[in-house]
Image: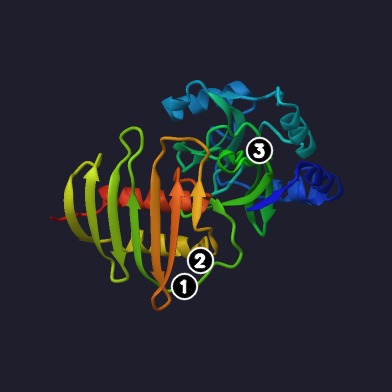
Amino acid sequence: MKKIKLIYLILLIITCSCNGQTNKSSETDLNRISTKYRNKIDNIISAKDIELLISTVDKRFNDFKVNESLKFSDKESQLFCDSLKIKPWIKADFDGNGYNDLLVVGNWGDHAVICLMDSGENKFYIKRITRRSFQDCTFPIVQVVGQTPVIINYSRSEPDWKNHKTDRLLIRDTLVFQFGDFVEFNSMPAKHTIEKIEYSTGPCFGTCPIFEMTINSNRKATFKAQEYNKVKGNFSSIIDTLNYNLLIHLLNYIDFVKLKKNYAVNWTDDQTCTLKITYDNGKIKEIRDYGLIGTFGLNRTYNILFKLRENQKWEK
């Protein structure tokens, strides 16, 4: 994640056009990445086509509208969008399965960026790029790293009201589809030996699941289900190899040791979680995350841990 002032970003975009969507080599690379079979996404030619397909995939997005005009009331957002030469949608095979996916800039309650993923045989699901509230200034472009299309996601940071800091910096994330979701691209994943993973969640103003989970390197795990889980009580299990390896590889890919110790959204009444990892002969990394979306990689980690509550055979 990189933070830069708007004026410097604009200059960077102008002077380094090789990083933008107008880069001819990038466009050539994108066009060169072909798909095996034509599908509904390949046939899309209009915003109405996109909205219709999205509404059939997930009813929660019935009100999603493509921002075809790319017009914004906020002047800084408009300058941002124009300078980056944003497109309202772009097709690319982000997950490498041979089928085009669709990255879309639109409105869903407020400004939203989503990616419609094609898992084959015209079966689709939606991944959100904007995952926080108040992300009114978030814009993606697509580039190619090697043979892999990635999303360069630009967004404005949230004001830090707690510390009386209202300046909003620009954040640049390079996102790649790995481990079942978009996470921050890392060309040099870590190789730590993870000995134990401990994860706990707290309450929120609502029905957020409250639980504690511990997973050891032999895959033996404990699960203490406290409130708002499908079960309640203390359980044990052996995590299946597939999910365990997914979790370990993801943690090393995002290089958890280099992440911050504390993350927080700037609204209230949300849930806090704590991720504690013992690694490399007793070293400990602990991350506290209010809002559970400190980074894209952490967000994916939490999702895997939440799913373990229900996709494993827990016994009392």
- The nearer-to-camera label among 1 and 2 is 2
Asked whether the residues under the numbered discs 1 and 3 touch, taking CB atoms below 8 Å apart as contact, a structural biologist would say no
Q: Which mark is residue 257?
A: 2
Residue that appears at 23% across and 59% down = 222
Q: Residues within 10 Å of mark 2 (few under 14, many from 20)?
A: some
Q: Residues within 10 Å of mark 3 (few under 14, many from 20)?
A: few
Of the numbered discs 1 and 2, the one sitting upstream in the chain is 1
| Mark 3 vs mark 2, CA separation in Å | 29 Å
| Mark 1 vs mark 2, CA separation in Å | 9 Å
Residue that appears at 78% across and 45% down = 9
**Residue 256 as seen in the image, left or right of residue 45:** left
The answer to whether residue 227 is visible is: yes
Q: Which residue does the numbered mark 3 point to in the structure image?
A: 166
Asked whether the residues under the numbered discs 1 and 2 touch, taking CB atoms below 8 Å apart as contact, a structural biologist would say yes
Q: Which residue does the numbered mark 1 point to in the structure image?
A: 192
Q: Nearer the viewer, residue 82 or 59?
A: 82
Residue 170: percent from left, percent from top: 69, 44
